[in-house]
Image (cartoon, helix red, strand yellow):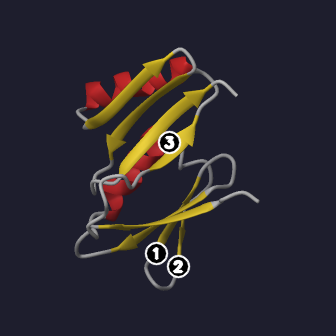
Amino acid sequence: MLMRHLALAVQDEQRSRRFYERYFGFAARPARRYPDGVLMLYDGEGFALALGPAAAVPQLPPFFHFGFSVAHRDHVHHLRDRFVADGVAIVEECDEPTYCSVKCCDPDGYVVEVAWEIA
C-alpha cells in the first residue's frame, strides 16, 4: 500500500502552489479545481497534493512534518542550496554517512523534509 495523497489547509493558494511546483515537482500534470474550492496538484509519479482554503493554518505539534525521499544525497544538498538562495526557512539539517536530510518551512509553516538514506 502506498500513500498517494496529502491535503493541506493553506491561506494563500497561489503562494503555496508556486512553492510546491518550484521545489517538489507538482506541475507534472495540469492542476484540477474541485467544486468545494480545493486545488489538486500532481507530481510526476501521480501523488496528489490538495490545497484547501483556510483562514488560518491549524496549530500542529512541533514533530509534525511530511517528507520526500530522493535517490542521492546530492539532491538534498542541491535543494538545501536552492532554499537558502531563495530565502526559504531551514529548520533542521542532518548530513551523516548513511542519512542526509533538510527540513524547511512551506509558506504556511508546514515542515517539509527532503531525505536520502542508504537502503
The image quarter in which residue 51 lies: bottom left
Q: Residues within 10 Å of mark 2 (few under 14, many from 20)?
A: few
* Of residues 80 and 30, the one drawn nearer to the viewer in this rendering: 80
In the displayed structure, does residue 42 sit left or right of residue 91? right
Q: Residue at x 28, y 63 (%)?
A: 12
Q: Are marks 3 and 1 in contact (CB under 8 Å)?
A: no
Q: Amino acid at mark 2?
A: Tyr
The residue under label 2 is 34
Q: Say which residue label 1 marks.
A: 38
Image quadrant in which the N terminus is located: bottom right
The reply to whether the C-beta atoms of the residues labelled 2 and 1 are less than 8 Å apart is: yes
Where residue 17 appears, as percent x and y from the top left, is 40, 55
Label 3 sits on a secondary structure element that is helix
Provide the secondary structure element on which disc 2 rests.
loop
**Above or below for 66 versus 78:** below
Q: Is residue 26 above or below residue 88?
A: below
The amino acid pointed to by label 3 is Phe
